[in-house]
Amino acid sequence: MSRFTVELLVTPRPGLLDPQGKAIHHALSSLGYDAVDEVRVGKAIYLEVTAATPEAARERVEEMCRKLLANPVTEDFRVTASQNGGAAG
Amino acid sequence: MSRFTVELLVTPRPGLLDPQGKAIHHALSSLGYDAVDEVRVGKAIYLEVTAATPEAARERVEEMCRKLLANPVTEDFRVTASQNGGAAG
Amino acid sequence: MMAADRDASGYGTTQAGGTATIAPPEPRPGDPPITPELVDDHGLSPDEFAQIRRILGRDPTFTELGVFSAMWSEHCGYKNSKRMLRLLPTQAPWVIQGPGENAGVIDVGGGYALAFKIESHNHPSAVEPYQGAATGIGGILRDVFTMGARPVATLNSLHFGDLERPRVRYLFGGVVKGIGDYGNCVGIPSTGGEVYFDRGYEENPIVNAMCLGLMRKEELIRGTAEGVGNTLMAVGARTGRDGIHGATFASEELSEGDDEASRPQVQVGDPFTEKLLLEASLELIASGHIVGIQDMGAAGLTSSGAEMAGRSGTGVEMDVALVPVREEGMTPYEILLSESQERMLVVAAAGREDAVREILEKWELEAETIGHVTASGAFRVLEDGVVVADIPALPLTEGCPTYERPGEEGDEVRSLRTMDIAPHEEPPAGLRDAFLRVVGSPNVASKQWVYEQYDTTVRANSIERPGGDAGVIRIPGTNRGIAASTDCNGRHTYLNPRVGAMGAVAEAARNVACTGAVPMAITNCLNFGSPLKPHIMHQFREAVLGMRDACGYLETPVTGGNVSFYNETDGKAVYPTPVIGMIGVMEDLDTIVRHPFQDAGDAILLLGTNTGELGGSEYLYAVHDLVAGEPPGVDLAAERALQRCILAMAARRVLKSAHDIASGGLAATLTESCLGRPRKGDGVGASVRFEDDLPDTALLFGEDHGRIVVSCAPGDEASVRGLAADYGVPCARIGTVTGKGSPLRIETPTAALQLGLDTLRERYFGAIPGIMNEAG
Amino acid sequence: MNVAIITFPGSNCDQDCHRSVDVAGGSPSYVWHRETSLGGADAVIVPGGFAHGDYLRPGAIARFSPIMDAVIDFARGGGLVVGICNGFQVLCEAGLLPGALLRNESLRFQSHDCRMRVERADTVYTSEYREGQVIRMPLSHADGNYYADPETLAELEDGGRVVFRYCDAGGAVSDAANPNGSLNNIGGIVNERGNVLGMMPHPDRAFDPALGSVDGLPLFTSLVGALARAEVA
Ligand SMILES: Nc1ncnc2c1ncn2[C@@H]1O[C@H](COP(=O)(O)OP(=O)(O)O)[C@@H](O)[C@H]1O
Ligand SMILES: [Mg+2]
């Protein structure tokens, strides 16, 4: 068994209003950053998981996602696992 | 000029208490997910940026980060750019 | 005579100032053909479709079918409720605006008018609790500020299934957070509400939000499109594909496995944009640049446009290509029916468009001219200049067919109602155990966990915050107050809808009166199952009749409300839940009365009579897991006398406390008066003794209406008794406040209980946090 | 004694601050966030609310409003600046006060009365309180969990710059009395020079007995008094 850092990215489903993204986009425009066309905001969740393989770790987290970590009604998610850290933090 | 999707991950600085991560960890444990040792929660921000090169797009977003998108007192960030999408959502 | 009966003869001809006759719209390329299946999918019956054809004199286009379907849905058209609702009393000298507008309005004195309204967001909250509840608050705020009133308070009435179930905790947690995050960001204090948990709401939570707004009387504005040639402007957020057919969705039963299909119907709230809209709208109204304004709520641009035209007898013409959209390739059908949040339709006076835009720019909001007011009497929609819908406005808004469906009491409820509950008067583990279970049941226990997630003090006018009988808000700059309460004990209305609804009105009025405010008017939210079922129709009719009687007798007319049908999952309906939102006015805030006991030595008196009615009580539910029996009866004459009496006592300032008796009976009321407020001191003990010849459980846990527990300084006891006698209200001294550190002692002819305040505190304040924290 | 109250589009305690200053005998006026000048104000209050919606981080976007340059200059010149609730968050983001306000430990929005001990009665903002006095007023926020790195925290403590600390009714500073997880139960701090104050609870909702507390009023009378003395001097 090894320890993996699993990165889970949860993003608002397309078509839904994303007020956070909208507000950030607006703020960036008024700061003069015109090159930005769109902003969407989601969550980045880092989990330290003990598992046999990275695939096993990833699968485990996908299961947690469906159960708890993402809201299927409003969010999509994507999971990647790597050994020995990899989290931004 | 092309359009790039820049992925920006903003995470709580190490050492900082992360109540959201703690709460998720607790919830996962009570669902029986014992293999999880630690959880940290940050933000995933996707920006559609028009720039000459991916590096230029990335640099631009790094500047936005230092200015607005991340709080240096409490957050670290990491930026990656890719052409033609790449956002989870 | 109904508008639809007038047919469409005036339509299409050129009228003064109107445009020339326009050829009927051609089917738009790509639109599906109008088939019986498509009509059925739109929730329209063959007869209704025939009527649409009569109104138009031809087949509708796909766009028009969508428009009719939304406007003639239950949600917008009130087709199964309108006839019953006409029975409700709606008038009083202080009513400025009765039902039919975005919100009702009453005169609250001192030159002020109060706009108020309650709305349901049950279906969206069942699918996505956080956003469903948040957007519910958003909608009700808009209904109030589009009347020209500044929102000053919100309340919420929530009914969920059993809190022991994880799904229920998820819904409850999400709904409370959604209400909080939205209202807090806009900066409107929450002053009260109610929360119930009962199996009757397992799959279908009831989420009703109420808003109160204040204005000077002359600031009232109505949602009309007046003045031919005036300009229609779309203001606020852009239109997306979210919530298309939300209105129809809210009118259909949820079924298992519907999740996937209902996904696109989730709308996301943006409270910051709402705050901007609020400020901008009030500024626009004050500026005189606009003649009408309306929220694009259910059925979006369709209902706002058609209703504004319908109310003023004009017509509107708009081009969907001019509407700012969030997504590409949206069809007229989608733009007309989108329920994207935080949008308004504004009618600007011709020539003032730039002035309007300037105000909106200050608030960083978009405003686009999308059309104008016509004299045609038609709701006419173009796409890039091509007509895609052309419908006479009045038949569209007023011509929705209405039905009076047969009703009959269900067998199941009849057997529960008539069940002999006497065998359950004996508590299995003793009286003390039953007492602690009742005050620790989530229904009776403190809702602190809920209301502490709501900003209750913003704007510094909250004179009485949640936690007492009714919240009280000061009218800024005056010494006048507005009290408000929402009430509906769904168990009572389930067992006997007529008596239960009367009880809801009586309790709401009593709650308000206990603070010293005069009950003035109500708004209501009628949450029921499918009206197509006779036993549901029976519940609906009976509830309306009970409300009619109580509102008439207590002189609290109905100024508006909302009907939410089809609260069912797989054929199982919620308890009939007619939520009452009561408004009261206090002329002098110094006369306010609160519920906690105060000083050792104060006399405790009971106003009203103990009758020991355990039917539908929390005791039966919490201790025997039973919903049965006749709910407590309502003696309207006695209720009215009691309320006048308590108001007189408040005005004379002879009371130290007053607290009404409802869920959990005397046990709950005495516990609450002893414990006082959370985080504020340690409460005081009391010693009470009853002489009633009733079984102990019936005495302590009976939920008989018409009772209030008051306390007063010993020197005022004679005045209190004297006033009670003047109003013919039974009044008995039942005990004494014993002060800090002492317990609650209760004696009956056959029992004696002593309950330490620490124990009571833990049960009462700890119940809901305990369940929510432990289970996560 | 003109006190400028900065109004962002999402401010919602601007009127409460206005009334508090008024009751305390000062002359309040509103300054819209898009202005670039404080119009000769003698002091500044940055009120509570959700300045620009605050979806990214409370105060992050507000810090770039045009008026903030004037506020920063004013503070750097020794002018009196108070940030309450969201105003505190804005001042931290703007670098006028150290540290940051994180999500409450409960992860919930919290709205209820809290008690604080007055740690310093010798600042311009607290001269009308007694040192050690226990005061009660509403708090109402989702992000009030004060954080600073260990060195900054030590500087604050060593410099006596913690002005208010969450406590119980008896004045004891304990975990149980800490509503949001703030380090060292910090409820309010001043900058090194003592002219900039930030606090999470709402003195602007506690200026009238009818509201349940008048414990916020001395903050405003202290401020107005300090301005009056400065005028005389
Ligand atoms: N959802 C809620 N939101 C705000 N306040 C609430 C809510 N639920 C209950 N409260 C408050 O808690 C107190 C007790 O409510 P409730 O149990 O319904 O009492 P009562 O039986 O006197 O109506 C009231 O002040 C009420 O306003
Ligand atoms: Mg109630």
Image: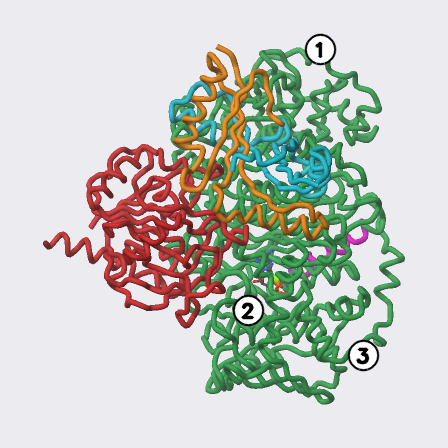
Chain colours: A cyan, B orange, C green, D red
> Which residue is drawn at the image coordinates 61% and 35% (left, top)?
A7
**Position of B59 compared to C695: left or right?**
left
* Location of the C terminus of chain C (image quadrant): bottom right
D66 and C228: which is toward the camera: D66
**Residue carrying label 3:** C426
Amino acid on which disc 2 is placed: Cys
Residue range highlighted in magenta:
C537-554
Amino acid on which disc 3 is placed: Glu
Chain of the residue displaying label 2: C
Question: Quick one: SS at disc 1?
Answer: loop
**Residue carrying label 2:** C514
Classify the position of ligand 1 by quadrant: top left, top right, bottom left or bottom right: bottom right
Q: Residue furthest front?
A: A1
Separation (CA) of disc 1 from disc 3: 73 Å
Chain of the residue displaying label 1: C
**Residue carrying label 1:** C29
Q: Residue furthest bottom?
A: C749
Of tags 3 and 2, which is closer to the observer? 3
Of tags 1 and 3, which is closer to the observer? 3
> Which residue is drawn at the image coordinates 29% and 40% (left, top)?
D31
Instruction: Please tell me the numbered disc located at residue C700.
Output: none
